[in-house]
Structure formats: structure tokens, C-alpha cells
Image (cartoon, rainbow, N blue to C red):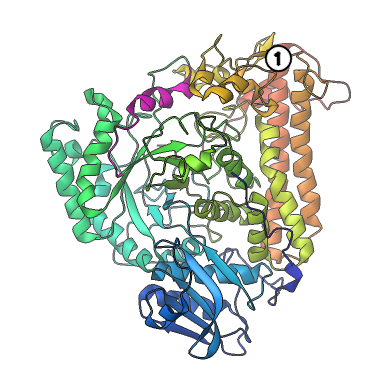
Amino acid sequence: MKRFCAWATALSLAAVALPFPAAADDGYALWLRMTAPSVGQVNVRLLGASPTLSLADSELRRALPAGSPPVVVATASAPSLHALRLPFEGLGEEGYLVRSVTLDGQRVLLVAGNSDRGALYGAFALIRHLATGGKADGVTLRSAPKIKLRVLDHWDNLDESVERGYAGQSLWDWWTLPDFRDPRYTDYARANASIGINGTVLNNVNAKADSLTAPYIAKAAALADVFRPWGIKVYLSVKFSAPIELGGLKTADPRDPVVAAWWKAKADEIYRTIPDFGGFLVKANSEGQPGPRDYGASHADGANMLAAAVKPHGGIVMWRAFVYAETDPEDRAKQAYTEFKPLDGQFAGNVLVQVKNGAIDFQPREPFHPLFGAMPRTPLMIEFQITKEYLGFATHLAYLGPLFTEVLDAKTGQKPGETVADVVDGQAEHHKLSGMAGVANIGRDRDWSGSTFNQANWYAFGRLAWDPELSAQDIARAWAAQTFGNDPQVIDTVTAMMMGSREAVVDYTGALGLAHLMATGHHYGPGPWVSDLARPEWNPTYYHRADANGIGFDRTASGSNAVSQYAGPVAKAFAKPETTPESMLLWFHHLPWDRRMKDGRTLWEDLVAHYDRGVAYVAGMQQQWDSLRGKIDAERWQKTATYLAIQEREARWWRDASLAYWMSVNHRALPAGVRAPEHDLAWYKAQHFPYAPGHTP
């Protein structure tokens, strides 16, 4: 797959007609700040009528500058378009076409699609084009989503807390729904539509059965009514034991006809209230959640039973492959492949198996999940985490576009040139059903995601779910232009900060393939020394296996042999330290501290250098941000500056605590000239944070 970068070098931000003054801004407007001057009238005409077409009309009137050419918004079925023979083929239901045409003797800018949703996406594409330096004259924009289901997973609980959420309480006020429909629900839907997201899972995958009761179905229906004109369907996470908890059944065995009948009746009830309900998301037999394996049944048995319940209504089931239990104590990374690979081809046609980007759990860096490419007869839906559970919560600047594209671009080794993106978008095996899910970082904070820069991760997810071949850097530049305005210095500086920020987090939390080194429970801060938890795979020491002689997890044939789960050429590369990328080295190999790296340093010296590089990058971002004082509105500038100071302090904490621990294990001195940790190891171990944010059930 070739990543698309066509417009990056051609972008002329100085040409944007609508500069954004550095006025007060609390971040609520996200990347949709482009508002046309009040003077002048934009000529927008609709061919047809629907709530969605009316939204496209209002968005264009809001954003287009005075003097723009007349705009016509339509669907391909509009009679007056038939004679134009426009290229609507291949756009599907959601694709769009924006181009100049002559209609009724007048030159107009047509914004159209095969459906009103396509026309709405086209309107937002035109607005984005103008906000990032494009001109209306002579524009031609044509695009269709490469992935069918582009879904946000909200880990929101019924008590309005958010698991691993760092932007305040849940956006959904379950207490006042369905009566009060907060205007923020509309603004949320608008933001999602602007980047092509078309689905929302309302509740936590650690679901409560109550979500399927009539009062909560009515609450979900109220949200569905708000979202529908924006092209967004609602989904619900379900608890597999709901037939027992709600229906009074003695079992939830998916092979029991009575259980299947209960789910069918429940699906019928939901669809009577929400006719366009999307379907179910399921976390089963993982982290204590019930599932089909409790009854000796398979994941396919469970998924297919639910799929049969929603199939008559056009619904789908997203069945998570995150099966984290004590079934494979040898290596947690192997478990999902072991359980799901044998089930390839056994899932119903309306089931997507939802696979995390890596085999452990949303770490700052993981190799791509070995299931991608290994289940050719099953549509696999990739799951990314937008909320930064392991990347500094809300306060650390960590742009995840490079993380997303690193995984999507990875070669599976199953077929020549095949990438993870080819599997996810269905191209590899010609699957009609495809999907990408992102664990949302959205909450009730005024700026939605806890900080301005966290908004970029929401934005990047949506853009890549529409087109996985987009460039992370191009997305960053577009977001910066839409968020901060058209000053070239601002765009260049912000983009430069963003593009290295995720790598900096990797450097100061655990480079060279180290992972899962955080403190337990809240996952805030370092804890590589933790070794006393009840299950081995809960402990950071399980993952790094450091001792006086070396460090790293041996996943080769001499260890857990997790490399064998990858296809031939990938497995062959990962099997030897010499051919394993150094960024993944300690993920696959346990190596001596004095092993020579490619740069000539020992492994120990190189690891220390990574910690220092990560801290230095954050300090550099502080200087870069300081250079934009006065070019960014004071409110957003000051909050970001404060958060960068927090990040710099906590990056040093991660670096110092980690080095203090590694030195206690390997009994080696720091390289000459390297600053010693500020405190001794006992001090770092004594740090305690019982009220860190992010609800933990």
C-alpha cells in the first residue's frame, strides 16, 4: 500500500481567505472553527429535501466566504443532473463528488453523492479543502470511504463515569435522557460527520445488562434521533449473561434455543424503538466478562447466535478478540490468535471480529496483531485506542496518527505486499463488510477531549477510517490549519511538534520494544518493578524479564514462540535479533545488556539514550510552543503550555524511575556524562496515586 501524500507539498496555507484571529477560544469548536464573514450572502441551493441535505446547506452557509461561486447540493438521483453524466459510479452510498458544472445555464459548484449522506460528507470535504488553503474555483474532490463501519467505542458507564476517560464525565447524561437532549449531542454528531465517522457504541464494553432494559433503550433511541440526520448509527455493548440477569433464564449458553429466542426478542424490541439500530458490540470471556466459553461453546457460537437475532433487521455483531484470561499463562500475546485462528470461516456473514492493533493492550508501541491476515475467511475490524490510557492520559502531547499508520502500513507477510490496511478494508479477501473502531477520548470537558491536541487524535482516527492510505503528516497539517488558522509558522511548528510526539512517549516510557511498564490499576506513571500481583501477566516484570544478564521477552522458538503466529517472512524476520527492527527488539528477544546495537552503543547505553531523547523532545516542544505565544489565542496557548510543563516533569519521572530500577537489576553504572536519577528507587516505589483519573471497574 502506498500512503497518499499528494497534496502535502502543494498546500499553500497562506492562500486561505479566512484568517482566524487569536481571540479567546476554549476549544469547543474543535476543527470546525471556519465561519464565513457576516457580510455577503452565499448562494446555496438544494435539489431535493431531507434533514441531511438541510444540514449540508447550513454547514456551507456557515463556512463559505462571501464571493464564493453558487453552490448546488444534491443527490445523484436529482433529475437535473442526469444529462451531466457525472462519475458517481464507485462512490457507493457515502462517497461524494465536488466539482464545477453548468446547471440550467449557470456555472455552479456541485456538492453531491449517491445519497444525502454522501452530499453531507462532500460539504464537509469542501469546507476542509478551503480551510487548508484550497480554492473554490476549479476544485474537484471525489472520494468514497474505503472502510464501511467507522465507529467510536465509548467506554461510558451508566453512572456517567468513563473507563480510561480523561476528559471528564460521560457525554451522555443518562439521568436526564430521553427527555432532555443536550445540544452537545448535536455538536458531537456534527464533529463526527465532518470526518466521516458513521457509528457510535454508546456504552462500555464492560457492559451492564441494564443497558438492554426498556428505559435505557428509550434513552439510546433519543440519541439515535439526534445522530440520524448526520449519518450516524448507534450500537450497544451487551453483557453476554443478560438472559440470566434480565430474563431470569438459568443459562446463557448460545446453543440453547431458549437463550437464542430471548436475544431475538430483545433485538426485535430494540429495532421497534430504533429502526436503524446498528447492532451489538461484545466483550466475552475477557477480564471477568461472561461468554460462550463458560458453557463449552466457542466464540463463533456466541457471535452467530447474536448475529441471527439482528440479521432480519440488517444489524451486525462486532465480536472482540481481546480474550484476556488465564488460559495461556505462557504468553498473554498469543491468546487471541490461539482461540480465534481455528474459528476462521465459522462466523456468520454479519459478524466482524474486532481485533486490537497489537496483541497485548494498546501499548505505546506494539507489533501488529498476528491475526491480521491469518483469518482470510473472516472480516477483521481493527480497534485502536484514541484515549491515551498508556500515553500520558490527557496531559501528554502524543499525536497518534503515526501509531495508527505504522500499524496500517505493516506488511502481514501472508501475500506479497499485503498490509494490515488491506485486511481491514476488505481488499485482501474482497470482504464486503469492513470496519475500524476507536476507543473514544471524548467527555464532558469543554474542549471535549481534555486538551486541544487530544482533539487531533479523534480527527486522525476519523480521517484514516475513511481512507487508511492518508498520510499522518498530511492529517496533522490539515488539523492544525482547521484548528489554529492559516499562519504558516503556526502550521509548520504545530505539525513538527505532533509528528515526533508519540515517539517521544515511547522513548521515555520504554523504547526498543519494552511495554506494559506502567504502574498497575490506574496505569499512571512508571512501575517496572511491580511483581507481586496475583496473576503473572498482570505484572510489568512478566513483560520485561530483566535480570543481571539481560532484558526482554523471548518470543522466539526458544521462548514462547509467539513469532510462529506471524506469516513466514514476518516470522523469519522477528525470529532473529539481527533482522528484528530495533524498535521491536525486546518485544521478541531477551538480550544481554552489553549487546552491540546498530549505532555501536551497547543495549544499555542505547536504552539510556532513548530515555534522554524522549525527555529532550518534550523540552523542545515547550520551546516550539513558546515561539507561538501571541499567534495562538491565550486560553488554548496557556493550557497547552501548562500541560507541556506537566509532560516534561512526568517524562523526567518516567526516565529517572525506570533507570533507577534497571540499575538495581543490572548493577551497571550510567554511561559517562548521563544525569543520575533525582531520587533513589525506594522514593519512586513509594509514590501512590489512589485517585488518578480514569474509572476502573
Q: What is the magenta segment's predominant secondary structure?
A: helix
Look at the image and tell me in which quarter the N terminus lies. top right
**Magenta residue check for 332:** yes
Amino acid on which disc 1 is placed: Ser
Q: Is residue 209 above or below residue 580?
A: below
Q: Nearer the viewer, residue 392 or 483?
A: 483
Range drawn in magenta: 331-350
Is 115 positioned to the left or the right of 122 in the image?
left
Residue 617 drawn at (x, y percent): 77, 41
Picture quadrant of residue 597: top right
Residue 352 drawn at (x, y percent): 36, 41
Q: Residue at (36%, 80%) from the top-left corner?
A: 49
**Magenta residue check for 351:** no
Q: Is residue 450 above or below residue 653?
A: below
Q: Nearer the viewer, residue 51 or 145?
A: 145
Q: Residue at (56%, 65%) from the top-left corner?
A: 28
Category of crowding for the residue at label 1, using alpha-carbon neighbours closer than 10 angstroms: few (below 14), some (14–19), many (at least 20): some
Q: Is residue 191 above or below residue 585?
A: below
Q: Name the element at disc 1.
A: helix
Q: Is residue 115 above or below residue 478?
A: below
Q: Residue at (78%, 23%) from the top-left corner?
A: 598
- The residue to which callout 1 is attached is 664
Residue that protrudes farthest toward the right in the picture: 673
Residue 92 drawn at (x, y percent): 41, 61
Residue 44 drawn at (x, y percent): 50, 84
Any part of residue 511 in sight: no
Any part of residue 193 in sight: yes
